[in-house]
Amino acid sequence: MNKKGQSLPLNTLIIIILVVIVLIVVAVFFLGGTSSLSKSIRNIFYGTTAGTDLTLAREICTQRCEPVQGLDVGKAKLTVYCTSGFNIDKDNDGSVDDGEAGIKCTEDPINHICQIRTSSTGATSRLVC
């Protein structure tokens, strides 16, 4: 009498493992709430420092300078390049203090220079906000 034991196919075992993992993730999501999940994701992508990184702020200013090209100086001063600021932790103490909030692209420590070329005259000048 040759009796062979029955076994589950390998595909079935893999599917069972994946289902268990998904159930665990769903349970953690509902039991832990979305606030802790979003906080964890935010810490992964943005780090734990306060404010915006200086290098990132300079890159954003460069990107904001590009659409200003071809505008008159008066209209260029109304764009996000001149009106929006950054929170930069200058002293690296982990918090944004007075004087570190709302720093514009042309202000210290960013000191970004946006050379604009007006469409009417073709002249190049530095945009001072």
Image (cartoon, rainbow, N blue to C red):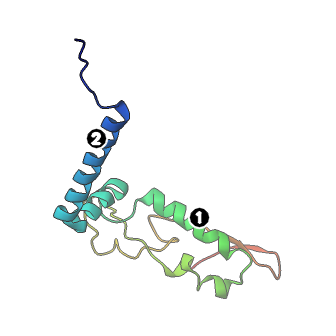
Mark number, residue 38: none
Residue assigned mark 1: 62
Q: Relative to residue 3, is residue 126 drawn left or right?
A: right
> Depth check: 3 or 17 in front?
3
Please tell me which residue is depicted at 32% across the width and 44% down the height of the picture: 18
Q: Relative to 103, does residue 75 appear above or below in the rendering? A: below
> Depth check: 43 or 83 in front?
43
Furthest residue toward top: 1
Please tell me which residue is depicted at 83% across the width and 80% down the height of the picture: 121
Instruction: Give the residue type at disc 1.
Output: Thr
Q: Relative to 23, does residue 72 appear above or below in the rendering? A: below
| Quarter of the image with the C terminus in it | bottom right
Measured from the top left, where is residue 26 in percent x and y? 25, 58
| Residue 89 picture quarter | bottom left
| Residue 8 picture quarter | top left
Measured from the top left, where is residue 66 in percent x and y? 66, 69
Badge 1: residue crowd in 10 Å (few <14, some 14–19, many ≥20): some
Instruction: Give the residue type at disc 2.
Output: Ile
Measured Cα–Cα span from mark 1 to mark 2: 48 Å
> Depth check: 33 or 65 in front?
33
> Depth check: 114 or 36 in front?
36
Q: Relative to 66, does residue 75 appear above or below in the rendering? A: below
| Quarter of the image with the N terminus in it | top left
Mark number, residue 17: 2
Q: Relative to residue 126, is residue 82 drawn left or right?
A: left
Labels 1 and 2 touching (C-beta < 8 A): no
Badge 2: residue crowd in 10 Å (few <14, some 14–19, many ≥20): few
Which structural element holds mark 1? Answer: helix
Mark closer to the chain start, 1 or 2: 2
Which structural element holds mark 2? Answer: helix
Please tell me which residue is depicted at 28% across the width and 41% down the height of the picture: 17
Which marked residue is nearer to the observer: mark 1 or mark 2?
A: 2
